[in-house]
Image: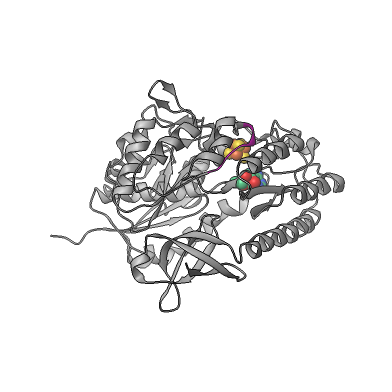
Amino acid sequence: MADPKKLYIKTYGCQMNVYDSERMAEALGAEGYVETGTPEDADMILLNTCHIREKAAEKVYSELGRYKPLRAKNPDLKIGVAGCVAQAEGAEIMARQPMVDLVVGPQTYHRLPEMMKTVDAGKAALDTDFPEEDKFEHLPKARKNLGRPSAFLTVQEGCDKFCAFCVVPYTRGAEVSRPVARILSEAEALVARGVKEITLLGQNVNAYHGAGEGGEWSLAQLIWALNDIEGLERIRFTTSHPNEMTDDLIEAHATCAKLMPYLHLPVQAGSDRVLKAMNRKHTAAEYIEIIDRLRAARPDLLLSGDFIVGFPGETEEEFADTLKLVERVGYGQAYSFKYSARPGTPAAEKEGIPDDVATERLARLQALLGDQQRAAQVAMVGRETRVLFEKTGRFEGQLVGKTEHLHACHVEAPQELLGQVARVRIVEAAPNSLKGVLV
Ligand code: 5AD
Ligand code: SF4
């Protein structure tokens, strides 16, 4: 028998891309491809790309450039571009980089096996449709055992919110929720292979409204159903929009035992004028009210957020409103970005602010967020929590896992605890992780 073909996938961007990469590997796995960790020995290289900011999108072309010598050495090497750059740029990618054999969008990757046949026949393959059929129904049902106790599960895709800066509604399409029964059976399959923690994914995950028994289910209803799966210990979800933070979902943070006390709830900016220009459809006060209600439901909730500085027209006072909001909320973790004009989005038509002003504002915001993150880590010292051990540490006898609040945590612990949840007391806050001891 011939050696199996080797597939190298490189993933950029969000967790939804991580999930998609796993599913693409499974789809090609069914065709006999095995994954390799290095591009050098691959027969097929697939870049799963991100289009959210200019920097992310440009990385694709510099990475493709690096494969030129590999292709020169191995003319049979196939190169594909998947994900959001593929969706946004389509055939342009092949025009700019003729080495690319295949371009596939996030909604058509179930067609990869077919597309590979075209490529193997020496022709280019391009598919960036938004098809009628549900891609998940055309992917292998059995999920691969990746040997990790924590898994992603996409439950919702796309976005109808059209924030003025964002490419997602164009690259991922309209909002769609997967049916409840299919999510539950995928979750059960994951748990059967040892998964203890599931993170439900969606660009707008809390807008989830999938078909279930008795009608459409909310995300909270779905979480409650997952809570009943024996062997599943932890549930998380990301990313949410403030306007979809429904009462039942807030309440689930108080009452649902397996739902972890961590929430990523992006606000982007603290000025009402900027929020309006961003088409966020909520005010700073409304966001804070939601945070207060969440904290009343779950006092130890750790909050995470996304921020954009230097949106077109942002004044110094408006930026100061973002700092004020951050002070008021207190984040345990956050992502902040300089505004990047994206082709095709409404905000891209407006004149931007000077780059040095935006850079300086980003530094100030990141300093504040960094202090808050540090304070949240230090506040964990002395507390008892539970850690899900995911891998062995750098030092012998050490395991590394995640706390309930999603902090990385190093603990001296026996190998048998790998893949398990154990009680841990936090004894130290190192710069990027916590240190704990088994209780
Ligand atoms: N420029 C900068 N940041 C952006 N984001 C989305 N679009 C842009 C853009 N054009 C950020 C937002 C979003 C996160 C995923 O990326 O903060 O929540
Ligand atoms: Fe983009 Fe999120 Fe806004 Fe949708 S809600 S347009 S994904 S920032």
Spot the residue most to the right.
317
Magenta highlight on residue 62? no
Q: Magenta region: which residues?
A: 238-243
Q: Relative to 438, is 282 on the left or the right?
A: right
Q: Residue 326, image x and y in percent?
A: 74, 50
Give the residue drawn at x 61%, y 37%: 241
Q: Quadrant of the N terminus?
A: bottom left
Give the residue drawn at x 59%, y 46%: 264
Q: Is residue 65 visible?
A: yes
Quadrant location, ligand no. 2: top right
Q: Residue 6, image x and y in percent?
A: 29, 60
Residue 288 lies in quadrant: top right
Using the image, determine if residue 67 lies above or below residue 291.
Answer: below
Spot the residue most to the left.
1
Quick one: 278 or 28, which is closer to the camera?
278
Q: Relative to 360, is 137 on the left or the right?
A: left
Magenta highlight on residue 239? yes
Spot the residue most to the front.
439
Spot the residue most to the top.
214
Q: How many marks?
A: 0
Q: Residue 296, image x and y in percent?
A: 65, 41
Using the image, determine if residue 397 lies above or below residue 127.
Answer: below
Using the image, determine if residue 290 lies above or below residue 385.
Answer: above
Using the image, determine if residue 7 lies above or below residue 108.
Answer: below
Residue 109 lies in quadrant: top left
Give the residue drawn at x 38%, y 52%: 196
